[in-house]
Image: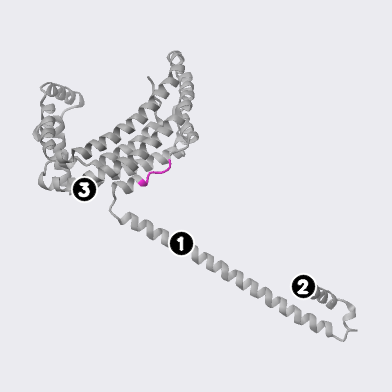
C-alpha cells in the first residue's frame, strides 16, 4: 500500500512547476514509474485476454463434448429402460392448472406456448419409440404380416375377410363385426392362442406373478387417489348438474385445482414403482423369453414383451394429470 501511495505522489509531483528546480530527477522517476505502470497494465490486459480466451475455449470444448455425447446417445440402440429414464420432470401444479384453464376456455395461443404442451409432446415421442423398438429389426413386409396376424387373432377374421372389411363404410364395418362377434369366433381364437402360449410360459409363471403383483400395487395407489378425488367431486356434483357451460367450466376448474396435488402425487408414485420395481422383473422375464421365442415362432410369443408393456403403462400414467374425473 505504501508503494502505491509513493508512486502516486511521484506522478503528481511530476506535473508541478517545481519539477524544474528538482533538476529533472523527479521527472525521470515519474517517466520510469509510468513505464512500469504501463507495462503492468499491458500485462494485466494480456492476462485478462488470455483468461477469456481460455474460458471461451473451455466452453467450446464443453459444447463439443455435449454434442458428441448426445450424438452417441442418439446412435445407440434404444432400450425400454433408457426411454423410461428420459421421462421429463412432471409439470408443476400451477402449470397443469394454467393449461387446463386455457383448454376449457379454448385459448389456443396459451395452449401452444404451455409447458404442459411441450411435456406431452416429449412423452408422446418417447411412447412412439417404445412401440418402435419391437419392430426395429423387422422390414415393412414383416411388420405388415404381424399386423395382419394380430388383427386375425383379435377379431377371428381371415386375411381375406379383413381386406374385404377395409373396403366397407364405417357403419357397415361395425355391423359386420357385431354379427361376427355374436358367433364367438374372435373369443375362441384368443382363448386358443392364450392356451397354447400358457404351455410354454409355465416356467415363467412365478416371475409373471411377481410382475402382476407390482402392477396391483400401482393400481392401489391410483385407486386411493380416485377415492380422494371422488370425495372432492361430491362437493361439486350438485352444482355441476345445474350449471351452464361457462359456469360448469369454472366449477370444473375449481374441482380440478382441488385434486391436482392428489393426481400428480399418485402419478409420480405409480411411475416410480413401475421404473424401480416392475421394470427389473420385466427385464428378467424378457431374458428368458428370448429362448422361448426361438422355439415358438408364433405371434403370441412376439407380443409377450413385458418390458415394452411396462414402459407403455409407465408413459400412459401421465394422462391422469389432465384428467378431470367425474363420478
- Front residue of this view, candidates 236 and 305: 305
* Disc nearer the start of the sequence (1/3): 1
Residue at the front extreme, as displayed: 206
Q: Give the crowd class for mark 2: few <14, some 14-19, many >=20 residues within 10 Å.
A: few
Coloration of the structure image = one colour
- Front residue of this view, candidates 255 and 242: 255
Direction from residue 141 to residue 4 in the image, left or right: right
Residue depth check, mark 1 versus mark 2: number of the one nearer the observer: 2
Q: Measure how far apart labels 1 and 2 are at the Cα level.
A: 41 Å
Q: Measure how far apart labels 1 and 3 are at the Cα level.
A: 38 Å
Q: Would you place residue 193 above or below residue 173 in this image?
A: below
Residue 175, x across and y down, in percent: 16, 22
Direction from residue 146 to residue 115 in the image, left or right: right
On the image, numbered disc 2 is attached to which residue?
Answer: 4
On the image, numbered disc 3 is attached to which residue?
Answer: 287
Residue 280, image quadrant: top left
Q: Residue at x 18, y 24 (%)?
A: 174
Overall secondary structure of the magenta section: loop
Q: Would you place residue 154 above or below residue 18 in this image?
A: above
The magenta region covers 85-89
Residue 8, image quadrant: bottom right
Q: Residue at x 52, y 65 (%)?
A: 56
Q: Give the crowd class for mark 3: few <14, some 14-19, many >=20 residues within 10 Å.
A: few
On the image, numbered disc 1 is attached to which residue?
Answer: 62
- SS at mark 3? helix
Residue 148, x across and y down, in percent: 14, 38
Amino acid at each position: 500500500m505504501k508503494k502505491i501511495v509513493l508512486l502516486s505522489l511521484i506522478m503528481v509531483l511530476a506535473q508541478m512547476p517545481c519539477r524544474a528546480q528538482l533538476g529533472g530527477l523527479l521527472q525521470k522517476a515519474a517517466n520510469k514509474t509510468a513505464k512500469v505502470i504501463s507495462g503492468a497494465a499491458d500485462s494485466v490486459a494480456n492476462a485478462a485476454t488470455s483468461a477469456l480466451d481460455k474460458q471461451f475455449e473451455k466452453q467450446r470444448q464443453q459444447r463439443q463434448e455435449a454434442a458428441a455425447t448426445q450424438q452417441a446417445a442418439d446412435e445407440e440402440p434404444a432400450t425400454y429402460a433408457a426411454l423410461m429414464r428420459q421421462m421429463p420432470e412432471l409439470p408443476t401444479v400451477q402449470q397443469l392448472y394454467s393449461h387446463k384453464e386455457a383448454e376449457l376456455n379454448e385459448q389456443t395461443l396459451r395452449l401452444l406456448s404451455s409447458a404442459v404442451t411441450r411435456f406431452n409432446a416429449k412423452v408422446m415421442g418417447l411412447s412412439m419409440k417404445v412401440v418402435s423398438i419391437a419392430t426395429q429389426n423387422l422390414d415393412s413386409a414383416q411388420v405388415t404380416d404381424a399386423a395382419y396376424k394380430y388383427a386375425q387373432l383379435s377379431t377371428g377374421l381371415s386375411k381375406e375377410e379383413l381386406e374385404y372389411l377395409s373396403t366397407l363404410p364405417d357403419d357397415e364395418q361395425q355391423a359386420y363385426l357385431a354379427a361376427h362377434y355374436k358367433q364367438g369366433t374372435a373369443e375362441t381364437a384368443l382363448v386358443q392362442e392364450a392356451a397354447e402360449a400358457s404351455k410354454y410360459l409355465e416356467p415363467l409363471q412365478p416371475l409373471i406373478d411377481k410382475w402382476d403383483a407390482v402392477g396391483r400395487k400401482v393400481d392401489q395407489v391410483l385407486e386411493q387417489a380416485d377415492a380422494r378425488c371422488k370425495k372432492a367431486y361430491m362437493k361439486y356434483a350438485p352444482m355441476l348438474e345445474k350449471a351452464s357451460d361457462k359456469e360448469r367450466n369454472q366449477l370444473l376448474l375449481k374441482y380440478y385445482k382441488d385434486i391436482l396435488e392428489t393426481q400428480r402425487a399418485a402419478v409420480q408414485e405409480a411411475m416410480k414403482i413401475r421404473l424401480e420395481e416392475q421394470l427389473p422383473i420385466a427385464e428378467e422375464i424378457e431374458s428368458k423369453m428370448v429362448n422361448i421365442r426361438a422355439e415358438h415362432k408364433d405371434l403370441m410369443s412376439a407380443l409377450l414383451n413385458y418390458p415394452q408393456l411396462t414402459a407403455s403403462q409407465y408413459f400412459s400414467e401421465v394422462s391422469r394429470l389432465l384428467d378431470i374425473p367425474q363420478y
